[in-house]
Amino acid sequence: MIPRTFLPVISELAQRIDDLLPQTQCTKCGFDGCTPYARAIAEGRADFNQCPPGGQEGVVRLAQLLGRPAKPLDISHGVERPRPRAVIDESVCIGCTLCAKACPVDAIVGAAKLMHTVLNDACTGCDLCVAPCPVDCIEMVPITGDATGWDAWTATQAAAAREQHARRNARLAAEQQAADERAALRVRQARMPWPPIPAAGGVDTGAAAAPNGAEITSGAGTGSATSDAQTTASSASQASRPPVAGDDGGVSIEALERARKQAIIQAALDRARARRAAGQPDASSARKPPGT
Ligand code: SF4
Ligand code: SF4
Ligand code: SF4
């Protein structure tokens, strides 16, 4: 556990380490991208020689920053090599989209069931798209001759890759939030009472205009909550429950709300008819002041 007072120092150090990493986001260091690896180094949870894309030059740069002696790249995380680029054999691609989902910098474009292609300038050569491809049609092709590590990659390219990775993370977060909101909406709709039960104790659940123009106030001064509920329940047989989103996946909250209001109006009409049949004054005339 790191003491709180050290956290700002750790964060600043992690930022400076991150600035020295190649930002290919390949995860070969054993972490989910360059920033988590930088944080792990700063916190003493990882050694500083685990980044193959940075190569030996990258290890030396980190050693200088940390004031430690340089050491060889730990090849258990991968070897230093000329930087490759992903190339898709489009004649074999079946458009499954798995490679695009795996790419940490959104360098693969295409649509479901259509062939995919790589945006050459955006590809960091991270290899992450190769394994998911079910038809093995992605090849990593070296493009930097004999140059390896930082000799094959520039700070400008690293900055662009970092920005692209941040954009992708923001997109994924927005998609996740939208999915969470849709799921929450489905839960709310599924819990919504049907048919709607007007509030007990004569509290209005909302006034609405009946088709004939008369004001209808559901539940207001029209008897006990029990009779309200009974009357409302009787209208249930006349009103069918509208589908909720998730029943067919396409019902909007507006449609559900419209149906809910219609049921309230129907319940109020039922009560008015029942009172007229019993020879009682209707709710609107019962509320009129004497002499009007
Ligand atoms: S480039 Fe790859 S190995 Fe190097 S720090 Fe980033 S994710 Fe880790
Ligand atoms: S296209 Fe493949 S190799 Fe290139 S960045 Fe994306 S996942 Fe990595
Ligand atoms: S994973 Fe392979 S088959 Fe699927 S879209 Fe990518 S290149 Fe095409």
Image: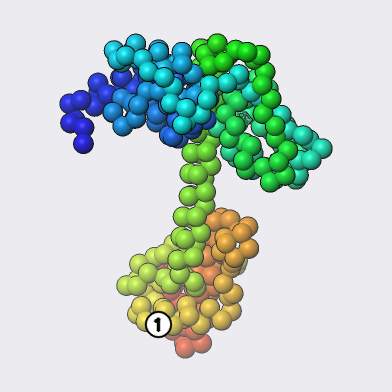
Q: Left or right: 151 with respect to 29?
A: right
Judging by the rendered image, the residue that carries numbered circle 1 is: 227
Q: In this view, does 149 lie above or below 103?
A: above
Residue 21 appears in the figure: yes
Rendered-image quadrant of the N terminus? top left
Give how far across and how far down residue 204 sits, in percent. 39, 65
> Quick one: 140 or 169, which is closer to the camera?
140
Q: Which amino acid does label 1 sit on?
A: Ser
Answer above or below: position of 53 versus 117. Answer: above
The total number of labels drawn is 1
| Residue appearing at x 20%, y 25% in the figure | 6
Quadrant in the picture for residue 132: top right
Please report the residue visible at 52 percent of the width from the left and 48 percent of the height from the top: 179
Residue 216 visible in rendering: no
Residue 110: image x %, image y %? 71, 36
> 266 left or right of 290?
right
Residue nearest the observer in this picture, 263 or 66: 66
- Secondary element at tag 1: helix
Label 1 crowd bin: few (<14), some (14–19), many (20+), radius 10 Å? some
Front in this rendered view, residue 278 or 165 = 165
Image quarter of residue 106: top right
Outermost bottom residue: 278
Indicate left or right for 106 with 43 as reference. right
Taking the view exactly as shown, the residue that stands out farthest to the right is 91
- Is residue 271 or residue 48 the one in the foreground? 48
